[in-house]
Amino acid sequence: MAQDRSESLNPLEASRQPDEDLVARLPTREGWSTPLTLYDNCWLRSHMVSKFMLVRDDFKPRRDDIILATHPKSGTTWLKSLAFTISSRSRCTFADHPLLTSNPQRVVPFIGVPGTGGDLDHLDTLPSPRLLSTHLPLTLLPPTVSTVGCRVVYLCREPKDAFVSRWHFDNKIGTGAPISLEDAFDMFCQGCSPFGPFWDHHLQYWNESLARPQEVMFLRYEEIVSDPLKVVRNLACFLGVPFTEEEEKSGLAEQIVRFCSFDSLRNLDANKAGGGVERAGGKIFLEASSLFRKGKVGDWVNHMSKDMGEKMDLLVKDKFKGSGLEF
């Protein structure tokens, strides 16, 4: 008779094992580059569900943590680069900067994602203050994120542009037949996309930023594009490391903007094709260059029909009605 696997574990290890029967019973849907499973009203890549189930119970936020939260394809790589460069400027120079040799996704680990430095046991060993990242909605993070005092920076993007970026990205990392724009659009509008529905994701962090504005900063991708210098200065203040008068006189904020610009990051050897392969959970393989496409605001018009754009706009208007959040 087969032994129950939990019997071979000590009590702590057993308590940290996801309920595999529960995972198997959860709704699953094909269509994107990997299957998605619906857990707690959030669509997650099926091969990562068990890892993410542990985050809410086992991740231990610290008071001085900084968590960069994003919905996928909303400027995650850019935000990581800016936040890391701002917060580490006292110990890193531009000449020997970690981003010259490492992709931003590795420099700032994803909570609960093995292979990115985000394994929960490994995160416990990192010195404070920790700079971490997540695509998880607020409801899948520990409740103490909202009470212990850690700071959260949330970045979102205009949904039509985010969708187009999502579609391109999934077709780059997929190994099977590419998903058509029409099929991807239908699923996205139904809320079925990695870490979707996107409206729930945005609203959770938006409402948290209204309730705790000193601890939750809500940013739009378009703000970074239109005025990166202003965002860098505001971000430095929020992170508790504002630029000194001397740093302002030396033009350090402008240097950070240039160093972390989309074109600058894309042209670094660490982020070029063949310059390294990112791995997430053992199921997704991608060249670092796939994290950099265009980054243009309004690029959706080159891919989506006018009818698609209008449908998305109506959906967004309906989902965010009365929230104060507009796109």
Image (spheres, rainbow, N blue to C red):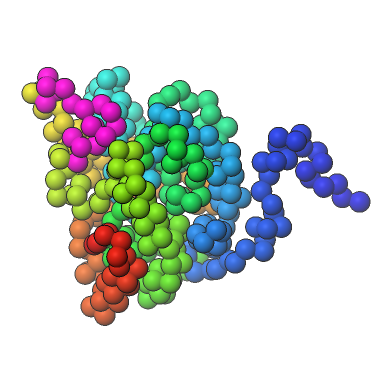
- Label count reads 0
Is residue 215 toward the left or the right of residue 13 in the image? left
Q: Residue furthest left?
A: 249
Using the image as rendered, state which of residue 145 and residue 111 is in the foreground.
145
Find residue 121 and report its image quarter. Answer: top right
Give the percent coordinates (x, y) of residue 23.
Answer: 65, 57
Using the image as rendered, state which of residue 205 and residue 275 is in the foreground.
205
Is residue 13 toward the left or the right of residue 52 in the image? right
245 within the magenta span: yes
Q: What predominant SS class does the magenta segment belong to?
A: helix
Give the percent coordinates (x, y) of residue 21.
Answer: 71, 57
Q: Is residue 298 visible?
A: yes
Above or below 5: residue 169: below
Stretch of the chain drawn in magenta: 231-248
Q: Residue drawn 21% across and 53% down?
A: 222
Give the percent coordinates (x, y) of residue 175.
Answer: 49, 60
Q: Residue furthest right?
A: 1
Q: Is residue 108 visible?
A: no
Q: Residue furthest bottom?
A: 307
Give the percent coordinates (x, y) of residue 180.
Answer: 40, 73
Q: Residue furthest front?
A: 211
| Quadrant containing the C terminus in the rendered view | bottom left
Find residue 37 and report its image quarter. Answer: bottom right
Above or below 68: residue 41: below
Q: Residue drawn 24% across and 66% down?
A: 300
Q: Residue drawn 36% across and 56% down?
A: 202
253 within the magenta span: no
